[in-house]
Image: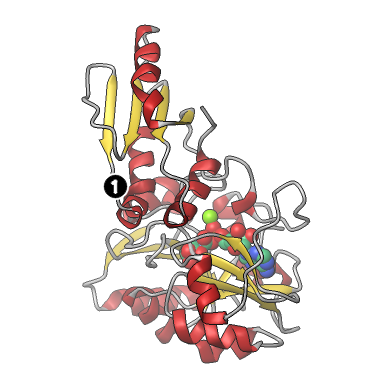
Amino acid sequence: MKLMPTADAAAIGYAVQLLRQGRLVAFPTETVYGLGADAANPDAVRRIFAAKGRPADHPLIVHIKDAEALTDWAAVVPDAAWKLAAHFWPGPLALILSKKPCVSMTVTGGQATVALRVPNHPLALGLLQAFDGGIAAPSANRFCRISPTQASHVVEELGDAVDLILDGGACQVGVESTIVDLSGGHPRLLRPGHITPFDIEAVLQTGLLMPVSAQSATLRAPGMMALHYAPTTVAMRCPTVDLPAGIQQLTTDGKRVGVLAYRHPLVASKRVHIIHVPEQADSYAQALYASLRELDGLQLDMILVEQPPETAAWQAINDRLRKATIAF
Ligand code: TXA
Ligand code: MG
């Protein structure tokens, strides 16, 4: 595995060369780092599944360079897709559309639909323009682990399983894209993200259906599985008022505790490691995965996460926390 900084002008050329050879290139997006392969090469796409340890029926997002490229992948591009693309791309929104027959089932995990997105990161866009094709890229972590938001996280997760990592620093958004399904009758949210249902409804001038629960979903969507984004240390969401007592009980039992706090002015002690994350939802999201990863690396007995508010601004964060932690 090779790590190359953005400043290296040769990096994109080398990345394109690797992609054309069917190899794997991790690259930054505004959300999280992606593990990329040529979306038109099923053997290359299979390497993504192997590197992540991800089951073959979990579909991948195909990254494209601009909205015009939608017609290379989607059999039908409804008006709603053009509107959302014009408004939010490049940006943290993936659209599910019915796929063209030429799109490999390897990339769509056997689905008749394909997920498409134009990422808003200069390095990702530079790579897509130079490659001039679709790049299939899930988050560059091992299956069921925390998504990487820095190049060093990708090294930790995948090591030599990836041929090249383009280092573009820390991701600005920090949680995965919003996913909207436009392949059926009415637009439906599949995964909350930085772009909220309110933002989408304002552009479409129509209501958005909410995700179906994991139990009733027939689709194998990894982001919908319980504890999908989990650290290896047991992690628990804890209401602000219960944090001090929770910590006291654990430390009295001789346990070492990590705390992810955004509001409570807790003070660290010998057995208590605290990470204070910002109180604004956007900045919190940016710091979330790196903070969980840091606490997870400390070999603690338990991680307590101060429960954020259940408001619209925190929807994507609460969704990820429900998948990374157990309830108090
Ligand atoms: O922000 C992101 O979307 C990042 C960056 C790298 O772009 N990618 C990402 O990929 O989060 P991944 O594979 O970790 O999550 C992709 C999600 C999964 O929940 C998958 O089930 C869903 O997209 N998905 C992909 N194709 C789909 C399809 N045809 N129908 C429904 N869901 C689909
Ligand atoms: Mg993922």
Give residue 70's position: percent from left, percent from top.
58, 86
Picture layout, residue 204 above or below residue 168: below
Give residue 294's position: percent from left, percent from top.
33, 38
Give residue 42's position: percent from left, percent from top.
66, 71
Picture layout, residue 147 above or below residue 106: above
Identity, as a three-letter code, of the amino acid under mark 1: Glu
The residue under the point 29% across, 38% down is: 263
Crowding at mark 1 (Cα within 10 Å: few <14, some 14-19, many 20+): few
| Residue topped by disc 1 | 279
Total marks drawn?
1
Give residue 221's position: percent from left, percent from top.
66, 56
Report whether residue 36 is seen. no
Ligand 1 lies in which image quarter?
bottom right
The residue under the point 49% across, 27% down is: 234
Report whether residue 110 is seen. yes
- Position of 236 compared to 15: left or right? right
Picture layout, residue 11 above or below residue 311: below
The residue under the point 43% across, 37% down is: 307
Q: Nearer the viewer, residue 17 or 80?
A: 80
Looking at the rendered structure, the secondary structure element under dot 1 is loop
Image quarter where the N terminus lies is bottom left
Describe the colour scheme in one phrase.
Answer: secondary structure
Q: Quadrant of residue 13?
A: bottom left
